[in-house]
Amino acid sequence: MADNLFDILKARGFIAQSTETEAALRERLATPLVAYNGFDPTADSFHVGTLVPIMALYWMQQCGHKPVALIGGATALVGDPSFKNDARKMLTLAEVADNCRALGGQLARLLRFDDSASGALLVNNADWLGTLNWIELLRAVGPHFSVNRMLSMDSVKGRMDAGGITFLEFNYMVMQAYDFMHLRRTLGCTLQTGGQDQWGNIVMGIELCRRSDAQEVAGLTFPLVTKADGTKFGKSEKGNVWLSAERTSPYEFFQFWRNVADSDVPRFFGFFTILPMAEIGQLCAPGADINRAKERLACEITTLIHGPAIAEQARADARKAFGADQDLSGDSIPHGPLPRSEVDGGIGLLGLMVRASLAPSNSEARRLVEGGGVRIHDRAITDPKTAVTAQDIVAGRIVLRAGKKRLYRFDIT
């Protein structure tokens, strides 16, 4: 292997916690190994938050390791209680099976599934958990689990503090621990990865492997990504941003990344693209064009998920909407008497809408804003007191939208 996976993950911001020291983990990753990450099929598509572990599996494969993507066809029937205030919705067997098929197809966009030494594997824990009877499972793992230890895990304590946890959900970490033991026995898997919320589950699997088989395995968690303002990552005004084109259109997907906060751009390049870190450093260097970097970010990620042709079309549509004289429907953007205007010290949104003839009066402009029908570029505005500032300038322009068809572009001199 030309590159040590540890160095790549460290440089790109993936490493949150490990059951080993950094030196020991780097040594472990210096030679090819089998590593797995679990994904519960709670929907028929991944959302963008799940891209962190998927991209980590991608880098594993690039460095010569064998990534195993585990689809939790069995664990999804129980539901992961980790840091949830309420029990997850119970899915039917048919829903879980359909979701498993859909997620496998999405993983194939980023992972190479073949018979080579580093060829990825797609497995479903329903294949081994579904055939176990209860007594068999209790005898296999029960003696190795301490209830006191399980109750000490933050994921369980949070549910206990919130009003309690069902016996069904309490068994989730037992099932996930069994997964690790099974994959170690059958595939030689020695590393489990997951988000920080999976730390307790991963630790229990490591302890089970040690106690049942006297085998030393390891765990690695990735950061749970948040936005610059501390809010949950992966949400748009319409809800989750999905990898499925049916759930989130490629254009909306592109715009989600195009509109991220300036301070998030370097981190997101590291997590969600395959660009070399040196090139990312140039794109995000002080004084560099941040809007150019955002467009590149959106193009790179959309290309990974939807392909280059669709990504290029999404970029062309965005430029047509915000950088040319037509919106996506082909209608001309109306030019009023003030096609050019300077932004100096902030402009009241309501007054700007009146000047652009998008509303006949401030009161009508206020009503439109409060009704959710106004956008600056592609960002919905609901506060009538919003000021339009220099931060809202994209490619030298500010585009106001009232409804779907009424647009006005201010060219900033």
Image: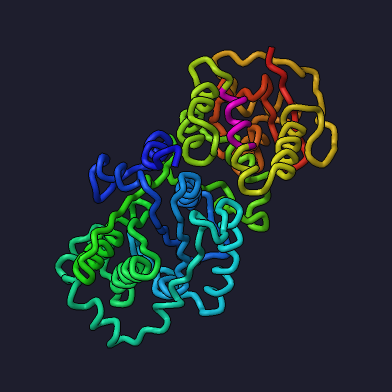
Q: Is residue 365 above or below residue 112?
A: above
Residue at the outermost right position: 331
Q: Identify the residue at image location x=52%, y=41%.
A: 272
Residue 84: x %, y % from top left: 35, 61
Q: In what quadrant of the picture does the N terminus appear?
A: top left
Secondary structure, magenta segment, majority class: helix
- Residue 89 inside the magenta-drawn segment: no
Q: Height in image: 317 above or below 38? A: above
Location of residue 253 with respect to 267 vertically, above or below: below
Residue 350 position in % (x across, y down): 63, 29
| 213 with respect to 34 (left or right) | left
Residue drawn at x 29%, y 85% as measured from the top left: 136
- Horizontal and vertical percent position of residue 122: 51, 64
Q: Magenta segment range?
A: 290-299
Residue drawn 71% across and 22% down?
410
Q: How is the image coloured?
A: rainbow
Query: Is residue 49 visible to the viewer in this orientation of the structure?
Result: no
Quarter of the figure with the C terminus: top right
Instruction: Tell me if I can see residue 171 in this picture.
Output: yes
Picture quadrant where residue 330 is located: top right
Residue 313 position by quadrant:
top right
Q: Is residue 241 left or right of residue 22?
A: right
Left or right: where 222 falls relative to 351: left
Closer to the camera, 237 or 55? Answer: 55
Count of marks placed on residues: 0
Rendered location of residue 392, percent (x, y): 59, 25
Point 30% across, 59% down: residue: 202
Q: Is residue 140 left or right of residue 8?
A: left
Camera-nearest residue between 84 and 33: 33
Is 285 in front, or is 43?
285
